[in-house]
Amino acid sequence: FTGLGIALLARGSIPGLVFAALLFGALHKGALDLDLETEKVTRDLSAVIQALILVALAAQPAIAGAFDRVAARFAKKKERA
């Protein structure tokens, strides 16, 4: 499942693939060390951060479309005035 997240984050580019793999690898390795050093923060924080990255990535087209609609609405109001 991590590979799917890396591929989605990379969006088909080789440099993006390297960056995404390093990011997720650092999150995973950091989570393993985190369990040894802290009592209140667990390794599940890494999974939550990865999930938030993927949700933000999946929501980006919808958010961009909403901004485009708002910008078009303001452009129409400006033309009328």
Image (spheres, rainbow, N blue to C red):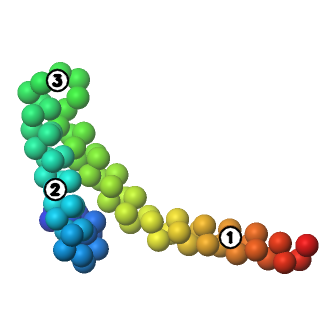
Q: Quadrant of residue 42?
A: top left
Circle 1 Cα neighbour tier, 10 Å, few/some/many (<14 / 14–19 / ≥20): few
Residue at point 79% right, 77% down?
A: 76
Q: Amino acid at mark 2?
A: Leu
How far from the left and from the top, in percent, is residue 63? 52, 65
Residue annotated with mark 3: 38
Q: Nearer the viewer, mark 1 or mark 3?
A: 1
Q: Residue at x 83, y 72 (%)?
A: 78
Q: Earlier in the sequence, mark 1 or mark 3?
A: 3
Vertical placement of 64 versus 47: above or below?
below
x and y, in percent, of residue 16 in the image: 24, 68
Q: Amino acid at mark 3?
A: Thr
Q: Which mark is residue 71?
A: 1
Instruction: Give neighbour class at mark 2: few <14, some 14-19, many 20+ (Cα, 10 Å).
Output: few
Element type at mark 2? helix
Residue 66 visible in the current orientation: yes
Judging by the rendered image, the residue that carries numbered circle 2 is 22
Q: CA distance from mark 1 to mark 3?
A: 46 Å
Q: Determine the CA span between mark 2 and mark 1.
A: 36 Å
SS at mark 1 in the image: helix
Q: Looking at the image, is mark 3 or mark 2 nearer the viewer?
A: 2
Q: How many marks?
A: 3
